[in-house]
Amino acid sequence: MNAQPAASLFIDGHPVEGEGAALPVLYPYTGEEIASLREASGDQVAQACQIAASAQPAWAVLAPVERGRVLIRAAAIIRERNEELSRLETLDTGKPIQETLVADWESGAQALEFFGGLAASITGQMIPLGRDWAYTRREPLGVCAGIGAWNYPSQIACWKAAPALVMGNAMVYKPSEETPLGALKLAEILLEAGLPEGVYNVVQGRGQVGAALTTDPNVAKVSLTGSVPTGRRVYTAAAEGMRHVTMELGGKSPLIVFDDANLEDAVSAAMLANFYSSGQICSNGTRVFLQEGIREAFLDRLAERVRNVRMGDPLDPETQHGPIVSPAQAEKIRAAIAAGEAEGAQLLCGGPGEGAFIPPTVFTDASDEMTITRDEIFGPVMTTLAFYDEQEVVCRANATGYGLAAGVFTQDLTRAHRVVGRLEAGTCWINTYNLTPVEMPFGGVKQSGLGRENSAAAIEHYSQLKSVYVGMGGVDAPY
Ligand SMILES: NC(=O)c1ccc[n+]([C@@H]2O[C@H](COP(=O)([O-])OP(=O)(O)OC[C@H]3O[C@@H](n4cnc5c(N)ncnc54)[C@H](O)[C@@H]3O)[C@@H](O)[C@H]2O)c1
Ligand SMILES: O=CCc1c[nH]cn1
C-alpha cells in the first residue's frame, strides 16, 4: 500500500521536503511502511512561522464572511472526498473504516462548516458611558501553533484550524509523528477552497519539532492535544513568551450507572466509552462505577455483547475493532493489563491479545487505588467498580487529578442534574456518552487542560479583545 504524499511538509502553499530525520509511516494493521517522510529542520520550522506571520495580515483584513466562505468550501470538498480521505485515515491510524467514514473527517467538516457560518456574526460590544462611549473589537492573535495527538488526526487538525482561521489567524500545524498524513490533505483542501498561500502550513516531526514551534518568536498561541506530561512541558515553554494556550489533555473519566438506569443503553454507552477507536479516545469513561443493584446484570450483558465484537482488518467494512496505533502503545496497554492482574483485579473478558490487537478488555473487582483505576491507559481497557450510594460515588469519581469528562446513567433526571453539578469534569453526559457535537464546548478541568474547542467558546481562545474608549467632548484636566 502506498500513501506517499507529494512531500513531507506544506509551507507557503506548496509541498516541501523535510530536511530533518526520517519519519516512516507504518500501517498499524500490517506494520508495512506506507509513506516515508522527513521531519522539518529547525530552520524549516522558523521559516514556516515567518511565512505564516507574513501571510496573516492580508487574511485578517478580509471581511469575516469571506473567510467563512473559504472554510465552508473546504467542508464541502472534504465531504465530496470522504471515502478517499477516510481510507487514508484508516491507513494512518488503523481505525476501522466503518468508524473513519462517519466520525473522523466528517467531524472536521462539521467544524469548518460551523466556524465558517459563525464568521459574520462575531462582533464586539458597544458600551454607553454617558456623554462618551466605548466599544470592543475581537482581534486575531497572529500565528497560532497547533500540535496534534494521533488518535483523531484529521478531527484534531480541523478543530484547531477552523476557529483559528475564521478569526483571521494564520496557523503552523504539527501533527503527531505517528499519524502525519491527514494534516497534509487538509492543507491541500484549504488551498483549493481559496485560503491564501502561507496561512495554513504543516511541519512534521517528533517532540523536539513541537518544542521548536512552541517557542518560535512568531508564535502567539499554542494549542496542544496530547498527554498531561506533554501538556505541562508545552504550557511551561509557552509561558516564557506569555503565549496563549489551549490544552486538550488526557483523562480517566468516570461513567456512573445507577440502579434505575436503562440496562441496555448503559451497556451500549460503556462499550462506546471504552472500545470505540480501540479505546484510544481522551474522554473515554474508563472508570465504570456500577451501583450494587444493577452490577451483576450489567456485567453479564456486557460480557455477552463484548463476545460479539468483530476484530480484524480495518479496511473490511464489517470490522468493529482495529489494531492499536503502534507497537509501543500496544506494549503500554499490555503493561497496564498485567498491572491490573498483578494487583488483584479480575478479567471478565479480553486480555493482552496478540501483535497489534488488544481485544475489548473488562476488569471487575477493582479498587480505587489500583493502577488501572488511577492511570490513563489509552486503550480498550474498562475498569468496573462497585458503589452503594450517590454521595460515595461522587466523592470517588472526583478523586482524580484528571477532569476531562464524566457520564451518568439514571432515569431520575433530578438526580442526574444534581450529580453532574457536583462532578469535576469539563464535559458531562446524561444517559449517553462521548458525543462531541461541534455546537457544544469540549475541554477539561484540573490536569486535563485549559480552554475549550468547538462552539462559539473556542473563538475566545483564538482571539483577543481590544477596548476602544471614544471621547465625545472636551478633555477635563486638573492642570
Ligand atoms: N483532550 C483532548 O481533546 C484529547 C484528544 C486526543 C488525545 N488526547 C490525549 O493525548 C494523549 C495521546 O496522544 P499522544 O500519545 O500523541 O500524546 P503525546 O503527549 O505523546 O503527544 C502529543 C503531541 O505533542 C508532541 N510533543 C511531544 N513532546 C513535545 C514537546 N516537548 N513540545 C511540543 N510538542 C511535543 C508530539 O509530537 C505529538 O504531536 C492521551 O493522553 C490522550 O488523552 C487528548
Ligand atoms: O479524543 C478526544 C476527542 C474526542 C472525543 N470524542 C471524539 N473525539
Image (cartoon, rainbow, N blue to C red):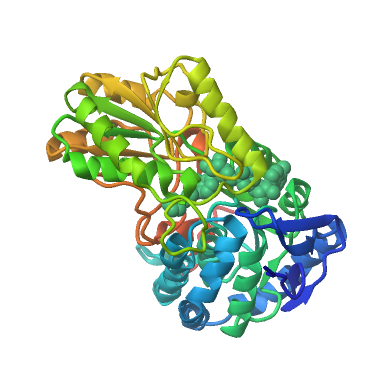
Quarter of the image where one finds residue 145: bottom right
Q: Quadrant of ligand 1?
A: top right
Closest to the observer, 409 or 228? 409
Quadrant of the rendering where the N terminus is positioned: bottom right
Quarter of the image where one finds residue 53: bottom right
Closest to the observer, 345 or 107? 345
Check the image and report above or below for 51 versus 153: below
User: In percent of the image, x 48 and y 32: which residue is there?
Assistant: 351
**Residue 64 shown left or right of residue 52 in the figure:** left
**Residue 25 shown left or right of residue 79 in the figure:** right
Quadrant of the rendering where the C terminus is positioned: bottom right
For residue 140, say whether it is visible. Answer: no
The percent coordinates of residue 413 (x first, y second) are 14, 40
The percent coordinates of residue 195 (x first, y second) are 61, 80
Check the image and report above or below for 211 versus 143: above
User: In percent of the image, x 65 and y 65: which residue is there?
Assistant: 181
User: In percent of the image, x 47 and y 44: which residue is there?
Assistant: 279
The percent coordinates of residue 243 (x first, y second) are 65, 50
The percent coordinates of residue 40 (x first, y second) are 81, 60
Q: How many marks?
A: 0
**Residue 52 shown left or right of residue 358 in the figure:** right
For residue 304, say whether it is visible. Answer: yes
